Each structure stands twice: as structure tokens, then as C-alpha cells.
Image: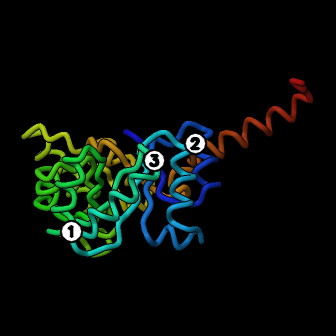
Amino acid sequence: MKFFVDTAVIEEIRELNDLGMVDGVTTNPSLILKSGRNILEVTREICELVSGPVSAEVVASKAEDMIAEGRKLVEIAPNIAVKVPLTWDGLKACKVLSDEGYMVNVTLCFSANQALLAAKAGATFISPFIGRLDDQSFDGLDLIEDIRTIYDNYDFKTQILAASIRTVNHVAECAKIGADVMTAPPSVIKALAKHMLTDSGLAQFNADWAKTGQSIL
């Protein structure tokens, strides 16, 4: 499973990228706001830092304006994936931009039917939002499983990009279901390395090593 990091903060991306943990980056207007940077400038810097897809989101609501914004965003770098919302206008923009050879990430997906439409429109990525479904007492992982089944049934090439991931369990379950990609905040990616038994085991090893009075160096 590919790891995308969900942030527009350069330092966070660089730290994970240096460890080989970044296959791509996702951003949105909220993350751009948090970064405090100009969208074109920070997106260009991210694209220079990572070689994988970098999702940059349009903010227009009409298809023709989304298409114009998408064409502007792809001028930044060849690894830009234009992020459009899963609305009818967003699907229209997806079709045009994907036909022009650009990567398109269709976001804010909350149903299998929406995911089916995105695949038909030529989306490179579909972004189902697990955490937000969980917030409304639905099981977001069920949606990932449904989309996987549908895409496999018809050999759709659209990649399932599991989004709105809040916990390390979300990551493991998405990997078991067969999501192609997951995007998560840096804090969740770092938390994947944590386990209380690792911590307790290390503490025991360190205590025993201290008793030997030895030094490796």
C-alpha cells in the first residue's frame, strides 16, 4: 500500500520523505490555510521535494471553472494530481482533465455509487473519507471494501485512496481490504511504529544491559 502524507507543511513532509515513507502528498484548502503559505508556492515546493503524486485541490464549484483552475495547477509540476469534489460538476471536470492526460483525485466520496461514477469519469484516484463516515455512526471501512469489490468486478484502474484516516487501526484494516493508497497526517504515520510491548521490551533490554556494565563503543 502506498503512503501519502496529508499535510502542506514542508518540514513534516521532508522528515517522512527522508525515511522513505512518502509515496505522495495530499493537500486541501484547510491544510493550505494551516501552512500559512501561498497555494502555488507551497505546492511547487512540495512537488520539488517528492517524486510521487501531489494532490492540489480546486476551489471553484462550476465545472468550467474547476477545469480552468486544474489547468493552472498542473502547470506547477508534472506530478500534480488535480483534486476535484465528487459533485456532478466535479465529475465533468474530472472527465475533461483526465482526457487531457492529467491525474485527477476525486475527493469527498461517501458512497460506492459515487466511487463508481468517479471511475467511469476516468479518475486516477478516488478518496473515500473513512473518519467522517465513522463520525456519523457509519463504518467507513465498509465503504472501502465495497469500492474494492466493485472496482475488481469490472477491472477499473482508479486507485482507492483511503482518506480521513484517524487511527493506526484504519491503516491496517485498509491494507487488509486492499486499498491502493492511504493518506494520513504525519502523526498517524509516526504512530504506526508505536506498541506498548515494544516499549516495555526495550526498557527491559536497557535495564539488563546497564547491569552488565558494558559498552559497545
Q: Which mark is residue 17?
A: 2
Q: Which mark is residue 119?
A: none
Q: Picture quarter containing residue 56? A: bottom left
Q: Is residue 104 left or right of residue 6?
A: left
Asked if 86 appears above or below 55 in the picture, the reply is: below
- Residue 144 percent coordinates (x, y): 23, 53
Which of the two labelled residues, at mark 3 and mark 2, occupies the earlier sequence position? Answer: 2
For the residue labelled by badge 3, is the local secondary structure a helix, a strand or a loop?
Answer: loop
Q: CA distance from mark 3 to mark 2?
A: 18 Å
Specify the color scheme. Answer: rainbow
Q: Amino acid at mark 2?
A: Asn
- Residue 82 percent coordinates (x, y): 34, 56
Q: Which mark is residue 77?
A: 3
- For disc 3, the neighbor class at 10 Å (few under 14, some 14 to 19, many from 20) is some
Q: CA distance from mark 1 to mark 3?
A: 22 Å
- Residue 78 percent coordinates (x, y): 41, 43
Q: Amino acid at mark 3?
A: Ala
Q: Quadrant of the C terminus?
A: top right
Q: Residue at x 59, y 71 (%)?
A: 36
Q: Nearer the viewer, residue 188 or 15?
A: 15
Q: Residue at x 24, y 53 (%)?
A: 97
Q: Residue furthest left?
A: 154
* 2 or 1: mark nearer the eye: 1
Which of the two labelled residues, at mark 1 and mark 3, occupies the earlier sequence position? Answer: 1
- For disc 2, the neighbor class at 10 Å (few under 14, some 14 to 19, many from 20) is some
Q: Residue at x 36, y 51 (%)?
A: 81
